[in-house]
Amino acid sequence: MAGNGGQMLHLECPLRLQATENGEWLTAGSFMPMASRLAMTSDLDLAAARLALDRIAAGTPAVAVNLSGESIFDTTFRNRLQNLIANRKDLAPRLWLEVSEVGAFRHFEEFRAFCNALRPLGCRLGIEHFGRQFSEIGHLHDIGLDYLKVDGSFIRDIDKQPGNQAFVKGLCGIAHNIGLTVIAEGVQSPEELAALPALGFDGATGPAVPRK
């Protein structure tokens, strides 16, 4: 993910699972429903956070980890994650932890507890796929959040969609007023990317973002 100046803000490292030795690597969309049925979501999220810290320790400038709403709801997971990061607190400022909009607002009090527990450790906290529950943005001003990632559906053809331009410009303005960085997800074209700074975005992800 890159900021407006072209600098890398963090790496997004999707979790993959190799089902059999030398077999294909499965995407999270393939194995997470199974993990949910087996009550293993929290274990996978904790493993992802541990791997991210290992990458940071090895020299990666910053890594973002997407955590499931189910894990956030789990008090034991929150405590285990807090202990994991506390034991490697020197790495925490380069760890970005995010939850989907659906997960954050479905369990909002648990998400607030998650932010309250993790914020003092110095890691960055955010919500991804944001936009459909824009009316709830007022609840985010006092929970220690750092950033929002705006869902790619609002970014698609943003260079020629006046309605979406007005919406995301307003969203960015409100988010900035409560101290949040705003990032566009899934930017597909150079034209979309070029339109973002004037609308108030601070960074972007997606195939159109140049790799440094």
Image (cartoon, helix red, strand yellow):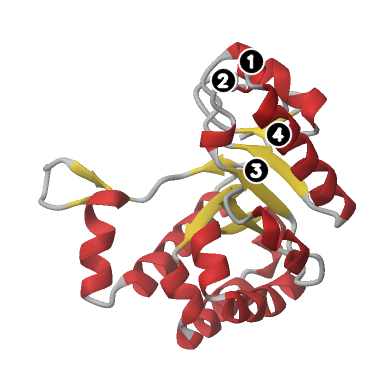
x and y percentages locating residue 103 in the rendered image: 49, 65
> Sequence-wise, which precedes: disc 2 or disc 3?
3
Mark 2, residue position: 157
**For the residues carrying marks 4 and 1, which lies nearer the camera in this image?**
1
Q: Is residue 210 above or below residue 37?
A: above
Q: Amino acid at mark 3?
A: Pro
Q: Amino acid at mark 2?
A: Asp
The answer to which quarter of the image holds residue 38 is bottom left
Q: Is residue 87 above or below residue 160?
A: below
Mark 3, residue position: 61
Mark 1 in CB contact with mark 2 (< 8 angstroms):
yes
Mark 1, residue position: 160
| Mark 2 residue element | loop
Residue 202 visible, this angle: no
> Label 4 crowding class (10 Å Cα cut-off): few <14, some 14-19, many 20+?
many
C-alpha distance separating marks 3 and 1: 35 Å
C-alpha distance separating marks 4 and 3: 16 Å
> What's the mark number on residue 203?
4
Q: Nearer the viewer, residue 123 or 190?
A: 190
x and y percentages locating residue 139 in the rendered image: 74, 68
> Label 2 crowding class (10 Å Cα cut-off): few <14, some 14-19, many 20+?
some
> Sequence-wise, which precedes: disc 4 or disc 1?
1
**For the residues carrying marks 4 and 3, which lies nearer the camera in this image?**
4
- In the rendered structure, the answer to whether residue 104 lies left or right of residue 92 reads left
Residue occupying the point 29% across, 50% down: 29
